[in-house]
Image (cartoon, rainbow, N blue to C red):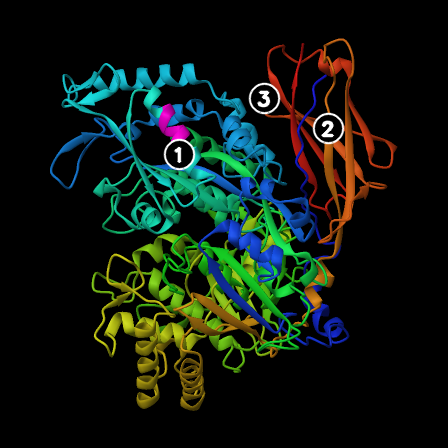
Amino acid sequence: MKKSRVIRFSLLALSVFAIGFAACAKSEGATEGKESGNGSIVDKVIFTVSMDESLAVKDVVEGRSDVFFQAVPPSIMSALSDTDRDKLDVYRVPSGAWSLITNPIPNKAPYTVKIPSGETVFNPLAVREVRYALNWLIDRKKIVDEILLGEGMPQMTSMTVGQPGTYQYNLIPAKLGMTETGDETKAIADIDAAMQAAAALPQNKGKLVKGPKFWQYNGKDVTVKFVIRVDDPNGRLLEGRYIAAQLEKAGFAVEQLEWDRVKANGTVYQGNPADYAWTLYTEGWGAGATRRWWDISLSQMYAPYYGYMPGGAEEGNWNYTHKKLDELGKKGLNGQFLTTEEYWRDNLEAQKIGLEEAVRIYVCSNLDSFVANKARFNKRMLYGLGDGLNNWSINSADVKPDTDGAFKGQKVLRVVSYSSRGGLFMSPWDPVGKGGFADVFSTMVANPCSDTKTDEAPNSAIDIPLLSTYDVDSAKVAPKLLPDGSMGGDVEVPADAVLYDTKTKEWKKVGSGFTVSVAASGKLYDGYRWHTGLPVTNIDARYAHAFSREWAIKDGDDDKYYDSALSESTLDALKNIKGVVFSDDGSIVSYVNYFFAPDMNRTVSNVGAVGVQAGAPGRRIVCPWEIYEALAEMVVHGSASGTAYSFAKDTGTEVDILTPAHVADIKAKLAEFVEQKHIPVSLKGLITEEEALERYKASIAFIEKYGHAYISNGPIMLTKIDTTTNSVIADAFRDYPYDSRYWPAQFSQKATAIEHVKLPSAPSADKDAEFEINVSEFVYPEIDYKPLSGGTVEIHLQQTDGTENVYPASKKSDGKFVAAIPAADMAKLQKGIDYTVVVISFIEKDKDAPSVTSVKLNLL
């Protein structure tokens, strides 16, 4: 009898419409959580690092730390005694993933590279067919079973297996013939055929030959320079060594470069692929967010323009390019689909191309375990059901007060993370450029300190208003496709709407005759303040709008206010904004050619919500306008120290609002602004000298008090950075608009979890195929599971033509359901094909993000 292995996880949705959050936050919040007030529940957060994961976990067990903010390796979890396990509250989430990234330079025949030494070498991973064959060379199930000890699942795409909205993407590898176990024989044959074809090229004849053990070029072994993470000894180190052995079977020598994260990431992500220091790397990813829609993953993990592919879209580097992937990726992120059908058609095409290009190859997802000391917490933290511990966890943590010591009587959350070198940050804290806040340690500390205009709910991934409200009901929506295929519409843009003109440095009326797909209004949520104590205002929004355009639009070859990497990421989206109206009541109406066909709430949140983030696209980093202005003027006109700064690593010293020397220059620039009574050109006529001086002086005072320039607007604020102990202290920011208990109450929600699926014992064409399904329910974020008493369970049979048949399950008793594929439908299936059956459970359709898993059905 066949049984499926089902890992428990689910996503749930909010039972109220997202816009309702902001509408009632003030009134409800005023009645709850008096002991904490506004901001975070805890009074203080202390972030530290450990150079040993086992010791970090032991510190949590013994109560020296409250929570280990990274996934605990399965080998460490399995080695814990029952006594130690009983002291831990475990958050189990499918939030991590392993992948391989290749350096495919030159990505065209004859596949040779002249390296810095002057030697010409053959790069086997420049051959697309060789890269693609790695999908069969690797036994993903072996990696999951033997290295992850079963705590994960084989994964071929960037979409986490089993999460809502992903199964369509994850069907594509199966259609391409990919399997969990791979096919070593096929892979070696395909690689050999690709290499023989390369050897037959006129440029390679007589130079590229198959030797007794390895392929050779000009008498030297063709070599894969494989960077393997040595500081993950129980995980990626073992993965890398296994894959290296497989590559040698395929005829390539492997130079195993076993490096730690600092050297590995610095070489792979910050170096130029043309330096040829590496050709393959064992990547590890946190999910980054709990997602409902996955178009951002297509851009991030496959499309070169986003900056996560070899070369990083950095000017001066050799860059992997693919116009079609860029086109499809931008369409998804920029809301350029008229219908849901078009959205799925093009996104699935992008996924297929990404798989076939095989520049990034996914290996497996990790069923991650995050641990907290059970006795220290009054209740479980919020956490992302798709990404684990995150900023919501920090801000909802409720620990018992210290009973002695320096913080006696205060609630202090002690967070530990792992770093093999004992360092906390490995990327600059640049709030403008694309390279800032690029490591998990930086985002762990920085994200809870900033509130962006909207966020994704940790339990559903539904867009919710945060810094800004937005109004779905009043939005005007009339999208249409223009003759060139781009998004347009029939919503008229008022002639007095404005845009910032980067050439004339003025806010100009757009004039008459323009139409767009969507117009939506938003308003900054009342009560937000910067950590200086001054309010967040529409002036911040105005400045951010102008700043984004200024640095993305190139006004001539001598334009100093231009960054090519920022432009590559943001210009297409900025071009879709056709006008903005700043209303007297404080609301802002935006007119944009953006339409997210599958989700109207997402459409309006992206168009109407008011943002004050001027840079760092894709990051959750927000600063007041005066910090952005100081950084920009340092980059363009120089600094007090004489350091030549930039917003990119390859054109100068990248700005860092934590580094003392940089902070001193920021302070000096602000002091210069005070002396000159400086008003940014985009704000002339909009603020007075007194208002500008108040901002500068407040930021100077903050820097003098705290020694850094990360001024933001979230529920905690950084108050001390100790580089000698590699620790960071953050205090609750009580001058914050939301009560500390508000969000935990809003996100408490009933959800389902599929526990087990029993497959038909002998599926055949002449009888119904019955699936027995066990489903539990629980109330997030707690984990008190009980059999599902009321809800819906379905199975979705995926056909080879891309369609699906849906069959409802009947309830036999609480928690036990049976679904059947009728014999008439079974008779239409082909023998010898593994059909995917997606199993879905939910409480209430269109309000819950369901629990999802998939199993295989093979007709006997």
Residue corresponding to mark 1: 240
Q: Position of residue 164 (x, y in %)?
A: 63, 41
Q: Who is closer to the viewer here, 67 or 265?
A: 67
Magenta run includes residue 394: no
Residue 205 seen in the current view: yes
Residue corresponding to mark 2: 757
Q: Who is closer to the viewer here, 332 or 406?
A: 406
Q: Position of residue 553 (x, y in %)?
A: 33, 61
Q: Position of residue 761 (x, y in %)?
A: 74, 15
* SS state under label 1: helix
Question: Residue drawn 44% across and 43% down?
Answer: 232
Whichever of labels 3 and 2 marks the residue nearer the N terminus, that label is 2
Q: Who is closer to the viewer here, 245 or 141?
A: 245
Left or right: residue 319 compared with residue 136: left
Residue corresponding to mark 3: 801
* Amino acid beneath label 2: Val
- How far is mark 1 from mark 2, CA to CA? 33 Å
* SS state under label 3: loop
Question: Residue drawn 60% across and 66% down?
Answer: 413
Magenta run includes residue 244: yes
* Amino acid beneath label 3: Asp
Query: Which stretch is magenta?
Result: 241-246
* SS state under label 2: strand
Against 361, residue 329 (above or below) is below
- How far is mark 3 from mark 2, CA to CA? 25 Å
Displayed quadrant of residue 841: top right
- Screen quadrant of the C terminus: top right
